[in-house]
Image (cartoon, rainbow, N blue to C red):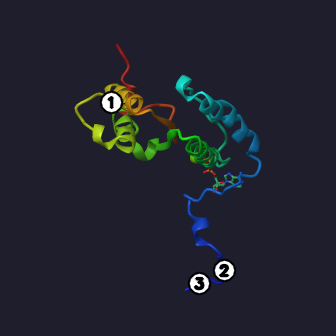
Amino acid sequence: MRSLIFKDRSKLSPYYIPAVLPHREKQIQLLGSIYMKMLDDIDGAYPVYTQIVGSVGTGKTCTTLRFGRMLTEEAERRGIRLEHVYMNCKVDGSTRFVLFGNLVKKVAPELSTRSLSGEEMLHRLVEYLKDRRKYVFISFDESSEEPKGEDNLQPN
Ligand SMILES: Nc1ncnc2c1ncn2[C@@H]1O[C@H](COP(=O)(O)OP(=O)(O)OP(=O)(O)O)[C@@H](O)[C@H]1O
Ligand SMILES: [Mg+2]
């Protein structure tokens, strides 16, 4: 039955990302100046890391997801195989081994194995992407400053 109160209930979902994010034009433009430019010379692309900081609820996740969509749409228009992979560190794993394992599972499930270290898995993933001329834009969300588990081991 059609709701008399809501025009579109899907807009209440935490996964709903509006097409336009008011007051985030500058941040989206800034991300664009870093990553959109890379599409002009994708063969010369190199890894670029950006940390997004801001108070709770200021739209870090929303802005990243919106920008990720813009970037992949633009890449598709140019015939570049680029995927946005969203990793939520609280859900996808708080140790490198689990997190990188889940990253590989999302991008290249056929490479997924438990017999390699996190770093080896990443290395395989990079080779896999290079062979296929594929690109990934990866966001790590909800990362804690203090890594847990094996990452937290300090040398004596
Ligand atoms: N530019 C915007 N205009 C209006 N609402 C927005 C905007 N950006 C985000 N929101 C809304 O504000 C809420 C919080 O956004 P979001 O989860 O992206 O923030 P966050 O900075 O990632 O929060 P946290 O620090 O808890 O991870 C969401 O409901 C989102 O839809
Ligand atoms: Mg967030």
Q: Disc 2 marks which amino acid? A: Ile
Q: CA distance from mark 3 to mark 1?
A: 48 Å
CB contact under 8 Å: marks 3 and 2: no
Is 124 placed above or below 14 here?
above
Q: Is residue 8 above or below residue 104?
A: below
Which sits earlier in the primary sequence, circle 1 or circle 2?
2
Residue at position x 60%, y 66% in the image: 12
Residue 58: where, in percent of width, then height? 68, 47
**Numbered label attached to residue 121:** 1
User: Which is nearer the eye, 68 or 97?
Assistant: 68
In this rendering, the answer to whether 37 lies above or below 58 is above
**Which of the 4 quarters of the picture holds residue 152?**
top left
Query: Residue 2: which numbered mark, if any?
Result: 3
What is the distance, in whole Å, between disc 1 and disc 2 at their CAs?
49 Å
Circle 2 Cα neighbour tier, 10 Å, few/some/many (<14 / 14–19 / ≥20):
few
Residue 6 picture location, percent across and down: 64, 76
Please report the residue visible at 48 percent of the width from the left and 36 percent of the height from the top: 136
Is label 2 in a helix, a strand or a loop? loop
Pointer 2 residue: 5
Front label number (1 vs 2): 1
In screen coordinates, is 71 left or right of 97?
right
Secondary structure type for disc 1: helix
For the N terminus, the quadrant is: bottom right
Dots 3, 1 in contact, CB < 8 A: no
- The residue tagged with tag 3: helix, strand or loop? loop
Residue 141 circle label: none
Q: Nearer the viewer, residue 78 or 30?
A: 78
Query: Which amino acid, by three-letter code, is at mark 3?
Result: Arg
